[in-house]
């Protein structure tokens, strides 16, 4: 939980913090579970159904983050529990992180930094690749995807996108097939939600369409990329590089990725700035307050 959450919650509610130790958590849930009416959590470490099952009087889940793939929202809705997340407030930072990864891969920032620190200067460092004027394919032109597109316009990139439905209000070319978008892209930026509908949508077919000059950036969810297929494509030079803020089995990283200079990795921290985490935390508190005042949630998951 962001640091501004606990104090505010404690001033309004009786708060119980779930211990990380499993046996302590079980004891606590047995003692106070039936009295719990609200749950503050986050989009990555949300409690499983087994925990929700021992909270029979739960009315509301307020999650910090956007993803609903780990939230068991359908299950919660089925029990009449309302669920809130924190959209919009993090879009700009996640977009910044996507652009940062694209630049870091293209200009080999980590390799260059290591060279300077090791006293090697330019030794062994090949030339990077241009980002400006290149073609950017965005998979998921939602709130974050659009914030990425706005930034890419300033780099004079040619922007196109894939999602389930075309948005004819947008000035960008729409592809109904993600592989066709990849074939026409130098950079493929993935920012769709996780879950069964998008699982492994970036597979070998898409990576081969992206091709040996192509770069994959993922700031959405690790589950959308077929990771073994990605590792193979990178190892065999069938794509040029990758920038990954999210991985399939976090925090476990395929060993091969850690040895590749053409890959930049980040620990699912795209929304991790002080400013955004405080805004996300505030929205968690405000959603819980709204619910217990009898008002609708500010940002409900529907
Ligand atoms: P939005 O709901 O605004 O956008 C989601 C986009 O994905 C829409 O364009 C939607 O279009 C598209 N989409 C959804 N399902 C599919 C599908 N099955 N196939 C193709 N396209 C699909 O969400 P945000 O932009 O706010 O966030 C996107 C995701 O980013 C979050 O769900 C979360 O998983 C991830 N995220 C990652 C963070 C990080 O730290 N790395 C931080 C925050 C979010 P359509 O419905 O037309 O298909």
Image (spheres, helix red, strand yellow):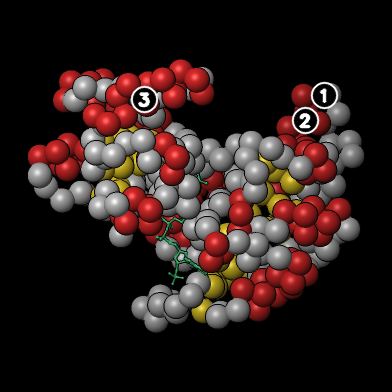
Q: Residue at x 19, y 25 (%)?
A: 13
Which quarter of the figure has residue 259? top right
Q: Secondary structure at mark 2?
A: helix
Which quarter of the figure has residue 104? top right
Residue 149, how many percent across, how many down? 48, 62
Quadrant of the snapshot with the N terminus = top left
Q: Does residue 92 show up?
A: no
Q: Nearer the viewer, residue 97 or 257?
A: 257
Residue 35, how many percent across, how many down? 24, 29
Residue 114's mark? 2
Which residue is disc 1 drawn over? 118
Could you tell me how far apart the alpha carbons at marks 3 and 1 are, in whole angstroms?
Answer: 55 Å
- Most extreme residue toward the left, as rendered? 294
Q: Secondary structure at mark 3?
A: helix
Q: Residues within 10 Å of mark 2 (few under 14, many from 20)?
A: few
Q: Residue at x 37, y 21 (%)?
A: 28
Question: Does the closest atom of ligand 1 sit within 8 Å of the Cβ of label 3?
Answer: no
């Amino acid at each position: 939980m962001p640091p501004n959450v606990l104090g505010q919650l404690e001033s309004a509610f009786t708060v119980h913090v779930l211990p990380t130790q499993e046996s302590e958590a079980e004891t606590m849930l047995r003692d106070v579970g039936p009295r719990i009416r609200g749950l503050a959590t986050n989009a990555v470490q949300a409690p499983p159904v087994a925990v929700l099952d021992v909270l029979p009087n739960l009315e509301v889940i307020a999650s910090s983050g956007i993803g609903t793939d780990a939230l068991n929202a359908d299950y919660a809705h089925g029990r009449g529990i309302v669920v809130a997340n924190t959209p919009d407030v993090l879009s700009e930072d996640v977009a910044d992180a996507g652009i940062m990864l694209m630049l870091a891969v293209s200009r080999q920032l980590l390799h260059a930094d290591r060279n300077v620190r090791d006293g090697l200067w330019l030794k062994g460092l090949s030339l990077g690749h241009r980002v400006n004027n290149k073609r950017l394919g965005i998979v998921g032109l939602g709130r974050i995807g659009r914030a990425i597109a706005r930034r890419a316009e300033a780099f004079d990139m040619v922007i196109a996108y894939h999602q389930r439905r075309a948005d004819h209000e947008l000035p960008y070319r729409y592809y109904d097939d993600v592989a066709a978008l990849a074939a026409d892209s130098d950079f493929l930026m993935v920012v769709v939600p996780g879950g069964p509908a998008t699982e492994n949508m970036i597979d070998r077919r898409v990576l081969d369409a992206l091709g040996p000059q192509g770069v994959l950036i993922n700031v959405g969810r690790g589950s959308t990329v077929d990771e073994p297929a990605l590792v193979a494509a990178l190892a065999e030079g069938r794509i040029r590089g990758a920038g990954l803020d999210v991985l399939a089995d976090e925090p476990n990283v395929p060993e091969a990725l850690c040895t590749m200079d053409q890959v930049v990795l980040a620990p699912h921290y795209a929304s991790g700035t002080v400013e955004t985490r405080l805004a996300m935390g505030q929205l968690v508190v405000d959603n819980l307050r709204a619910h217990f005042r009898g008002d609708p949630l500010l940002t409900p998951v529907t």
